[in-house]
């Protein structure tokens, strides 16, 4: 068990955790959002972030502070917490972003770590190399070596109680991301940012983002706290949490506000395009869009930033509540409908259902089947695997409902889309207590047929009859040849 | 054009409208929520509903006022607006609900309409017969005759400037609902409640609810303001608006609060089950669930009712904004994932795609394909119909991408799932500018194949080649025999 991170609750790949931050003398509950504070610009003050929005942690950039004579001296004298007037934990970035933007920076990992410690940072960052997406394998591998050297320097540095992050790079090459994750996990560093995903998010490549995260997670293992670096749009938090991310940072709330852009969990809107505020926060109930547009620039920016934070923190709470209630994937199902690219992201997440299944709890509240994608959830996969361990009588009726005559069989099991067959003894257990639509769909029928096929293939000597109701021919084509078929619709 | 209702914006079956309420000297923008005020109990005062939540209209029960000596006298003396202290429009119910619950009431339609007028109601209701779901056709038809008699009595009554509603009944028999709608439309009454749907909603029968609404709408015609009587849960507003409902009334906000139940657009939660508030409203940002649980009963009830109203009014604003932006069905896509029964409701709504298509605007912002259900949206249907009017050259290549060699053809048209084929000239027009996922699905391919089939069947003499990429056999089975097939995946 990792000392500084304890996992309290799990749902799919998502978890509620507690990150102990010894230097701040505090713990941070995850999933957590770290608002980004630009030390030169104060859209919403750190004190207000704590008091009004409940922020337990924020992030600022030590490189910017280091490069400004006045800020640097004040940070050295007062310490970051007094400088910013923030009572929670403070994480600092290192200048890696500036490195990736401008090609070089004027500090080393040793120097910036020492500076971060000096000014009282609670979680420091070495200077890693944020390799962009789609570069050649060789370049990504070579950059990664440099990053790994920097992590080893960080490991050897005298950082006291300060936590240190170990960024995971590797561009869009999953095996490099996995290797990077594994290397980072082997260091004694504490927090694991998945780096350089911002270009993917800017291009709506949520599918590639999920592949990158899933690969990093395979390397890191289950108990590492994972930070999705630069991810601040609430539309994708649920998806990213379900993939196993714990920490997010948002500059978006302030940057977007400066641009009159308004965040929602369904995407970004421009204030000029809004006739009504689709939100229940205090900003959106106190004023109409036209009233907000009429405010002076600075006041409008501050109000928009406050809205952006309200919707962002509410989504974090919604996600935590969903994890606690065991319906995180139901929330992801909804967020997946925000944009076709989010649907791609969810479909990609389900490619990793076996990876999610490893951590997913055996029992939760109630499985809701709410789309064709639900047929690919980890719970369906787990049920299919469980079929291998069930003992099957010589003569077995599998039936979609109780109306099928079952005389002459050793036993009769129900078949429920999307899960497939199960013996009566399991009928009250998760996920077979699922709520499913009256109007089923082919994805659910196909998954059920695959369950039947798996049971039959594991038990080739059993005599199996499947009583279905009006299943289409291409679904029935998935059932092995030896199975006798009865269509209950014909019998009626 | 109906005098008292003007439609400003349309998306699918949903619209933003303006209901003129002459007696209140005001207009009400729809979709609108009418909070239900129990004249004996004041969870949130009508004044606060107007000032803090922006309620333009509320509903109260004239039968309860009529039956209480004290209330009746005060209502007669002061008038409803002063009695309740509400500056907007006031609609009154008639006792029909009490009739359905207790079997009889002690007023007639004439009496209660006169009383409603006397106490200053702005929109009155006759005593209709709320026939429950699933009763025999004969009973529903006989009840409906009584309701229709009452509407005719109401039509003949002296109601002055007061608007009068014409409830549409007919149980779960669509042809009766349609006939009832048609009859109501023929009266000179003003507002059209679809009645007795509460039992359907209580049983999560959103599919049957949509069939009932769609039938009533067919009878009523496009320009009638429709009230979904007794519908107060924000989870289903978007679906109901997309089906063509304009007015909702909510007693839920107060009744649920009394029971420690917390409304969300994803369903109802019990306060005891919440560890985090999944909401951005002032109630949910000021306190944690445990802090709210610790409040005295009356204060807790009032805070919960305020939350319930915030989330309810925010959803109404979100729906209006979606109509304005032309993405109402994208919102319905998301709400359909709240519960399998909501998915049934959405799938049922798409059964009525042809009915929705009649009012759906020709052009909107951008079509988002976000689920298998998207393939059945009215825009896809409309495109298929439009294919019949396109002129087709003798030799035509239909291709899923530009990589197909097009030499030797008179023309080459793109094929885009879910729409199917279209000539270059249409490529910048709605909905062919759609955003679709990278990972397409069979529903989209099937719809595209159906488009190809429709084009070919309308133009049997054209020589058509379809260049697809890896389309599965059962999708290709939908393409007529005469079409030459090229698989671009083989060519590469």
Image (cartoon, coloured by chain):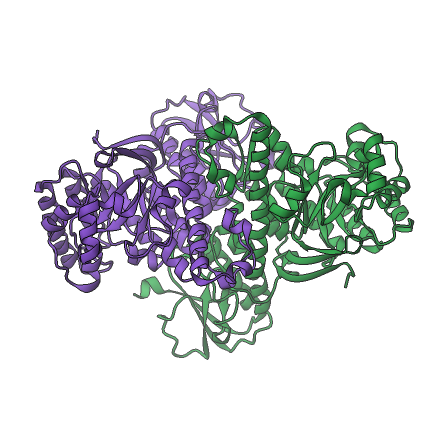
Chain colours: A purple, B green
- At 40% from the left edge and 55% from the top edge, which residue is drawn? A341
Q: Nearer the viewer, residue B306 or A357?
A: B306
Q: Position of residue B118 (x, y in %)?
A: 87, 44
Q: Nearer the viewer, residue A397 or B192?
A: B192
Q: Position of residue A492 (x, y in %)?
A: 63, 34
On the image, which quarter does residue B263 sit in?
top right
- At 16% from the left edge and 52% from the top edge, which residue is drawn? A128
Q: Is residue B133 above or below residue A216?
A: above
Q: Is residue B357 left or right of residue A480?
A: right
Q: Is residue B480 above or below residue A263?
A: below
Q: Is residue B68 left or right of residue A387?
A: right
- At 21% from the left edge and 30% from the top edge, which residue is drawn? A3
Q: Is residue B481 visible?
A: no
Q: Is residue B373 visible?
A: yes
Q: Nearer the viewer, residue A168 or A379?
A: A168
Q: Position of residue B429 (x, y in %)?
A: 51, 70
On the image, which quarter does residue B379 sit in?
bottom right
- At 21% from the left edge and 45% from the top edge, which residue is drawn? A78
């Amino acid at each position: 068990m990792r000392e500084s991170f304890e996992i309290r609750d799990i749902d799919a790949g998502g978890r509620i955790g507690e990150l102990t931050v010894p230097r701040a003398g505090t713990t941070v509950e995850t999933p957590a959002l770290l608002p980004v504070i630009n030390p030169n610009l104060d859209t919403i003050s750190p004190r207000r972030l704590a008091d009004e929005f409940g922020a337990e942690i924020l992030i600022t950039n030590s490189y910017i502070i280091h490069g400004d004579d006045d800020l640097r001296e004040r940070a050295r004298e007062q310490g970051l917490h007094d400088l910013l007037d923030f009572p929670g934990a403070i994480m600092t970035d290192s200048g890696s972003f500036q490195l990736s933007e401008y090609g070089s920076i004027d500090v080393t990992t040793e120097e910036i770590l020492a500076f971060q410690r000096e000014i009282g940072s609670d979680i420091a960052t070495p200077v890693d190399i944020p390799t962009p997406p789609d570069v050649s394998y060789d370049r990504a591998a070579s950059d990664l070596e440099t990053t790994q050297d920097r992590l080893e320097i960080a490991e050897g540095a005298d950082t006291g109680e300060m936590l240190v992050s170990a960024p995971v790079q590797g561009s869009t090459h999953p095996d490099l991301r996995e290797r990077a994750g594994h290397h980072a996990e082997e260091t004694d560093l504490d927090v694991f940012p998945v780096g350089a995903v911002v270009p993917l998010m800017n291009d709506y490549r949520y599918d590639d983002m999920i592949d990158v995260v899933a690969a990093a997670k395979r390397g890191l293992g289950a108990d590492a706290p994972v930070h999705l670096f630069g991810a601040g749009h609430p539309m994708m938090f649920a998806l990213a949490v379900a993939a196993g991310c714990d920490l997010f940072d948002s500059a978006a709330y302030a940057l977007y506000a400066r641009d009159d852009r308004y965040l929602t969990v369904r995407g970004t809107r421009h204030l000029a395009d809004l006739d009504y505020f689709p939100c229940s926060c205090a900003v959106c109930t106190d004023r109409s869009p036209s009233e907000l547009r009429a405010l002076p620039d600075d006041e409008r920016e501050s109000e928009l930033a406050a809205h952006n934070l309200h919707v962002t923190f509410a989504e974090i709470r919604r996600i935590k509540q969903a994890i606690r209630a065991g319906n995180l994937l139901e929330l992801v199902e909804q967020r997946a409908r925000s944009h076709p690219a989010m649907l791609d992201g969810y479909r990609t997440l389900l490619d990793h259902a076996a990876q999610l299944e490893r951590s997913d709890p055996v029992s939760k509240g109630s499985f809701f089947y709410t789309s064709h994608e639900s047929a690919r959830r980890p719970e369906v996969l787990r049920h299919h695997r469980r079929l291998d361990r069930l003992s099957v009588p010589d003569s077995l009726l599998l039936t979609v409902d109780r109306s099928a005559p079952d005389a002459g069989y050793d036993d009769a099991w129900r078949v429920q889309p999307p899960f497939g067959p199960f013996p009566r003894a399991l009928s009250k257990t998760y996920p077979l207590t699922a709520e499913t639509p009256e109007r089923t769909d082919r994805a659910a029928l196909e998954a059920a047929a695959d369950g039947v096929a798996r049971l039959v293939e594991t038990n080739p000597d059993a005599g199996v009859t499947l009583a279905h109701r009006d299943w289409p021919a291409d679904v029935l084509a998935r059932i092995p040849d030896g199975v006798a078929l009865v269509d209950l619709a014909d019998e009626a």
